[in-house]
Amino acid sequence: MLKEQFLGRNPSHFQINPVVKAFIVSETFLWSAWNFVTPIFAIFVVSNIEGGNVQIAASAFSVYLIARVFSELLSGRYLLGKIERGKFILTIGGMLFLSLSYVGFAFSNTIFYLFFFYAMAGVGLGIASPAKNSLFSTHLDKNKEPSEWGIYDAITFTGMALATALGGFIANQYGFSFLFLLASIVNLLGIFPYLLYIREK
């Protein structure tokens, strides 16, 4: 089946717009970093946060979601009519904010800091998501949209699956602080595809 799908295709069929490539590579780093920690975050809260329990972990995730909702609404409104450069800047700024939240988690031991840095993560993703999704959707190659969305899902979900297993191993062997710092670095790597594209332009 796969052989029939891919053999005999013109090489141009597999070419992808540079912005789409940058987006896919960046998203792989971003969501791999996120899945280093999210599946086991409740364990971090119970074992590393004073007074932490499963309910606190769930509430912290709710704070993240609420912060992200408001940030996405504001970011989306701000982006109306903005040129592409502004979208790149907002994407990079949001990802930097997210990396800072990971660093904050590495040194958190109270519920206040837990909620604060989870809200920061929500703001970071809320700022970045409308901008980067807009860049991706406007640069999809005509008549290749389904395949490029498929490539995006295949690559990012593979990265997420590997990161989830690796995150559990790292937390068990080296602790959560090291894991959060590593997640911050991996997330920062997701900025470079955009920087390289901007530099080329």
Image: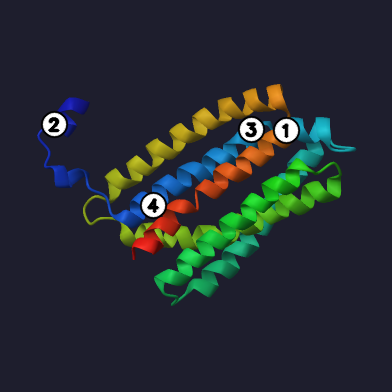
Q: Indicate the secondary structure of the residue bearing disc 1.
A: helix
Whether residue 181 is visible, yes or no, is: yes
Task: Nearest to the eye among marks 1 and 3: give it.
Answer: 1
Mark before the other along the chain sequence, 2 or 1: 2
- CA distance separating discs 3 and 4: 26 Å
The image's mark for residue 39 is 3
Could you say which is closer to the camera, residue 168 or residue 153? 168
Type of colouring = rainbow
Q: Position of residue 134 (x, y in %)?
A: 42, 62
According to the picture, the residue beneath numbered tag 4 turns out to be 22
The image's mark for residue 7 is 2
Q: Answer above or below: position of 132 versus 4.
A: below
- CA distance separating discs 4 and 2: 26 Å
Q: Answer above or below: position of 162 versus 32.
A: above
Could you say which is closer to the camera, residue 54 or residue 87? 87
Question: On the rendered structure, is 23 left or right of 105?
Answer: left
| Cβ–Cβ under 8 Å for marks 4 and 2 | no
Under mark 1, the amino acid is Phe
Q: Position of residue 49 (x, y in %)?
A: 84, 38
According to the picture, the residue beneath numbered tag 1 turns out to be 176
Question: On the rendered structure, is 92 left or right of 133?
Answer: right
Mark before the other along the chain sequence, 1 or 4: 4
Under mark 2, the amino acid is Leu
Q: Quadrant of the C terminus?
A: bottom left
Question: On the rendered structure, is 198 left or right of 96?
Answer: left
**Would you call the spot at circle 4 few (<14 residues within 10 Å), some (14-19), or many (20 or more)?**
many
Q: Residue furthest right?
A: 51
| Cβ–Cβ under 8 Å for marks 1 and 4 | no
